[in-house]
Image: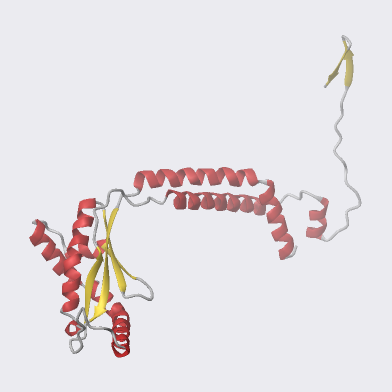
Amino acid sequence: MNIDTNIERILRLLLKKWKVLVIFGIIGVMLGYVYTSSFTTLTYSSTVEFLAYAVDTNQELSGTQQLTPQHQISNTSKMNYAMNMMPTYIELFKTNEFNMKVADELNDRLGTAYTASQIKGAISIVSIEDTALFKFTVTTTDPEMSYQIAHQLESSVPEAMSKTNSGLVNASVEDMALKPTSYENLGYFKKCTIGFIGGAIIAAAILILKDMLDVRIKSSEELSERYDIPVLGTIPDFEIKTITQKNGKKEDN
């Protein structure tokens, strides 16, 4: 029996038992829903967005001065420099030193006891492609905590950048932090979909394994393929019906 025949046999088996696959898939959906609703922790996120810009102390433009082509080239170069430096600054914001400073400033302001590891674990940083914009997202189980950390970053991030690399790149707040009013999406659809696929795969594996362990010969074609011998004939199934007459009615026994 070649590989193509085996695959065809498995496909026929799965199509024949499609109801079993669907039932196991539905069970997987139910398990995914129960798991999500019972064991997933509610989280709240607050974001703050910054714009990085390079500082040129030798060439400052007043508000009334018109831009010349030379100035435009200079501004473009400064923007490119800020964009190229973004990976370096993002790594800076992931250091224990920076997060410890954020925690200390936050604790001094609120009288709390946040640690550097708590701050670091709550923060994710994304640099927006082809721009000098970057965004901090703070995610915790407490909406107030998420907001306060994000609000603290509004001052901590520009301060850290101004003290690094001789202050050649600074940051301004472009989108301030807001207190989250609802929790993050728990991902019901994703987890239920995974549950359905997982249930169907388990059902398919059981059916295939059961079929492989079944050594019975179910057809003349399988007999010929397995033992390479001709089949002279088969005995058909007969259904014998005895018809009796009683009270003018026919009864099947």
Residue 172: x, y in percent? 22, 71
Please tell me which residue is depicted at 30% across the width and 70% down the height of the picture.
134
Nearest the camera: 10 or 173? 173
- The percent coordinates of residue 238 (x first, y second) are 86, 35
Q: Residue at x 16, y 62 (%)?
A: 115
Outermost residue to the right: 232
Relative to 64, residue 28 above or below: above
- Which residue is at 13% across, 61% downward? 106
Residue 33 relative to residue 52: left or right: right
Relative to 176, say whether 88 is above or below: below
Which of these two is toward me, 62 or 172?
A: 62
Q: Is residue 9 something that shows in the picture?
A: yes
Q: Is residue 30 or residue 105 the one in the foreground?
A: 105
Could you say where residue 35 lies in the image, as x and y percent from the top left?
40, 46
Q: Residue furthest top?
A: 247
Residue 214 appears in the figure: no
> Looking at the rendering, in which quadrant would you find the N terminus?
bottom right
